[in-house]
């Protein structure tokens, strides 16, 4: 069974940093591209970032460029999102997703990030 | 990129059909056959329902179908059931760098 389990969410002050992790199991992790997608409370889905299977290529939404860094450790079957210079508008549920056929075919349960003083 | 445009709401009675549109541009929906659809129940993670415009993942009922014409994609739910009441989002790939753009979301109500 495919599982994606996010961790690392929480309350952080504006300007602070947080690192999200996503532990993957049930599939061959290093053969899949992976993504982060976020959803602000009561709002829609927004793509944040994508990383290819060996970590050599990444992509970011404009809102994440220069502040967020996606990475992966294929030996640990884990995806990461390092988030710096956090703003109130980054408050959201962050989902880890598996990329397949240009879609998000598997989703984690999400990690809630709240940016507030 | 701007979000794809979906109607805020749609509704139908049990057994009826409902169709949700997803309008983009020639740079996203119209330019690639990489449209996908997601169902999200309150408090839950989204679930993939359709990928590559019209393909269904294993386990998704054939009541769900997808299509595309020009810059507009559509999701049709036939034989509406109570459990189909949820938010639905479309998504499209927008090019070689593979950023994705999502739709604005549609709340489907089963009357």
Image: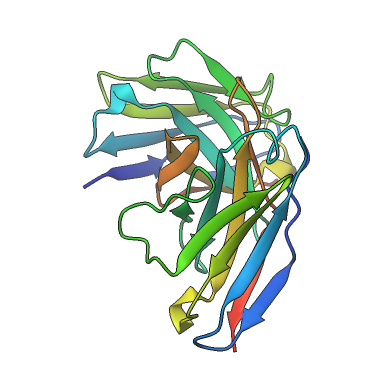
Left or right relative to B47: residue B1: right
Considering only vertical position in the picture, is B37 above or below A14?
Answer: below
Q: Work out which quarter of the rendered image holds the C terminus of chain B and state it.
A: bottom right
Q: Residue A117's spot in the image, x, y percent?
A: 70, 45
Left or right relative to B8: residue B46: left
Q: Residue A97's spot in the image, x, y percent?
A: 44, 40
Q: How many marks?
A: 0
Quarter holding residue A52: top left
Q: Residue B108's spot in the image, x, y percent?
A: 61, 74
Residue A96 seen by the camera: no
Q: Residue furthest top?
A: A56
Considering only vertical position in the picture, is A85 above or below A46?
Answer: above
Considering only vertical position in the picture, is B55 above or below B11?
Answer: above
Closer to us: B93 or A111: B93
Considering only vertical position in the picture, is A70 above or below B30?
Answer: above
Q: Residue A90's spot in the image, x, y percent?
A: 67, 41
Q: Residue furthest front?
A: B69
Residue at the image position 74 percent from the left and 67 percent from the top: B8
Query: What scheme was used to colour the molecule?
Result: rainbow
Left or right relative to A28: residue A65: right
Residue at the image position 57 percent from the left and 78 percent from the top: B17
Q: Work out which quarter of the rendered image holds the N terminus of chain B and state it.
A: top right
Closer to us: B6 or B42: B6
Closer to us: B97 or A23: B97
Residue A50 seen by the camera: yes
Residue at the image position 41 percent from the left and 33 percent from the top: A21
Closer to us: A3 or A9: A3
Residue at the image position 47 percent from the left and 83 percent from the top: B82
């Amino acid at each position: 069974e495919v599982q994606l389990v996010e961790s690392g969410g929480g309350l952080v002050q504006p300007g602070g940093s947080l690192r999200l992790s996503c532990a993957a199991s049930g599939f061959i992790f290093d053969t899949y591209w992976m993504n982060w997608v976020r959803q602000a409370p009561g709002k829609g889905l927004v793509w944040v970032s994508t990383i290819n299977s060996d970590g050599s290529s990444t992509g970011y939404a404009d809102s994440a460029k220069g502040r967020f860094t996606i990475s992966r450790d294929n030996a640990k079957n884990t995806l990461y999102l390092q988030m710096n210079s956090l703003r109130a508008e980054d408050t959201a549920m962050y989902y880890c997703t598996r990329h397949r056929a240009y879609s998000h075919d598997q989703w984690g349960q999400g990690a809630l990030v709240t940016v507030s003083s | 990129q701007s979000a794809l445009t979906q109607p805020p709401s749609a509704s139908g009675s049990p057994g009826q059909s409902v169709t949700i549109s997803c309008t983009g541009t020639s740079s996203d929906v119209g330019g690639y056959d990489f449209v996908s659809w997601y169902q999200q129940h309150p408090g839950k993670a989204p679930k993939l329902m359709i990928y590559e415009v019209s393909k269904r993942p294993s386990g998704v009922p054939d009541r769900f179908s997808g299509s595309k014409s020009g810059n507009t994609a559509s999701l049709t739910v036939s034989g509406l059931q109570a459990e189909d009441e949820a938010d639905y989002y479309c998504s499209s790939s927008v090019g070689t760098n593979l950023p994705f753009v999502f739709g604005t979301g549609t709340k489907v109500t089963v009357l």
